[in-house]
Amino acid sequence: MHHAPGTPARPSRLPRALLAVALAAAGLAALPVTPAGAGDGRPAAALAANPYERGPAPTAASIEATRGPFAFAQTTVSASSVSGFRGGTIYYPTSTAEGTFGAVAISPGFTAGQSAVAWLGPRLASQGFVVITIDTLSVYDQPASRGTQLLAALDYLTNTSAVRTRIDRNRLAVMGHSMGGGGSLSAASTRPALQAAIPLTGWHSVKNWSSVRVPTLVIGAENDSVAPVSSHSEPFYTSLPATLDKAYLELNAASHSAPTSPNVTVAKYSISWLKRFVDDDTRYDQFLCPAPRGTAIEEYRDTCPHS
């Protein structure tokens, strides 16, 4: 498991069966494990095997829904109160009864403000993540700069924000649209301790991302004329290491702007990817492996089964 120097590593992703054996050998299996807020039907053993699970068992309906099971609130971050990016909006689950949450920073694209990705804030927060949608220092910032700003936003979230105690600082992810999507690749390349990256119809002049070690879901759009998949999303995906947990989802008959308004397909698989790799929640494997199919998906590639 990747972890930044000087920060504690997350527990390794042990298969549940092996962890159960280890617990039994240590005489812990018989101990009652009933953390506050665990009345969602999950057995204690499952909670012990994966302490990052949040919320009830997922269904196709639950991840396609406009809102998930968590009540959430939002707060504005003024540009004058932060450095490294130009403020934004934080969306966060209001209860921490189940524990702390993973966090996601999301960047808009070229010439756009955070409103272009704002729909993802409530969508992800209600599924059990702390989310910050950011405004960039300039609407003309290039992808590499947007990547640096995504990391600055995550550092703000975990170190000084009003919601920092709600966040597990070892479970962080980046997303972005267009040049913000390219920025998410830059951020993943810069900070391998991240747990997930999701470029949404990403644009970047760099095509080789073989250095990335962060589980990455690349989402492209079939009819994208701004960042055509043949010169952006597809080479991004193919250049990622073959040994990496990665996937490529191409939206059927969709344009470059598809991820900038509520989109069930974008939400469904982004939620599943974040749950699987930020929360280590294998309950979401069912939506990623075997490769999903459907009229909304033009193409899907993957490295299933995930490690």
Image (cartoon, helix red, strand yellow):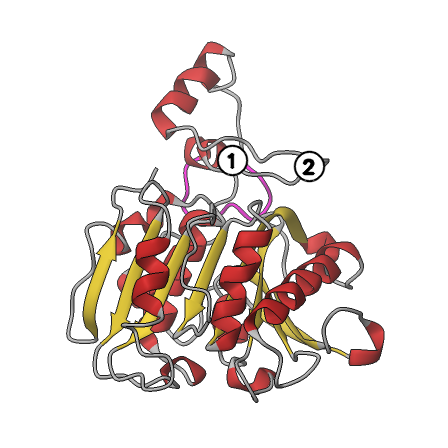
Depth check: 199 or 232 in front?
A: 232
- Outermost bottom residue: 111
Q: Residues within 10 Å of mark 1 (few under 14, many from 20)?
A: few
Which residue: 47% across, 48% down? 211
> SS class of the residue under badge 1?
loop
Q: Secondary structure at mark 2?
A: loop
Give percent across and percent down for residue 208: 41, 57
Left or right position of 163 against 286: right
In the image, what residue type sits under mark 1?
Answer: Met
Question: What is the count of numbered marks?
Answer: 2
Whether residue 227 is situated above or below residue 144 in the rendered picture: below
Q: In x, y percent, where is residue 198?
A: 44, 63
**Residue on which disc 2 sits:** 5
Is the residue 307 above or below the residue 154 in the image? above
Residue 194: % across, % down: 55, 50
Placement of the C terminus among the 4 image quadrants? top left
Main SS, magenta region, reads: loop
Per the rendered image, the range of residues in magenta is 34-43
Q: Are marks 2 and 1 in contact (CB under 8 Å)?
A: no
As drawn, the label of residue 1 is 1
Q: Quadrant of residue 273?
A: bottom left
Q: Which mark is residue 278?
A: none
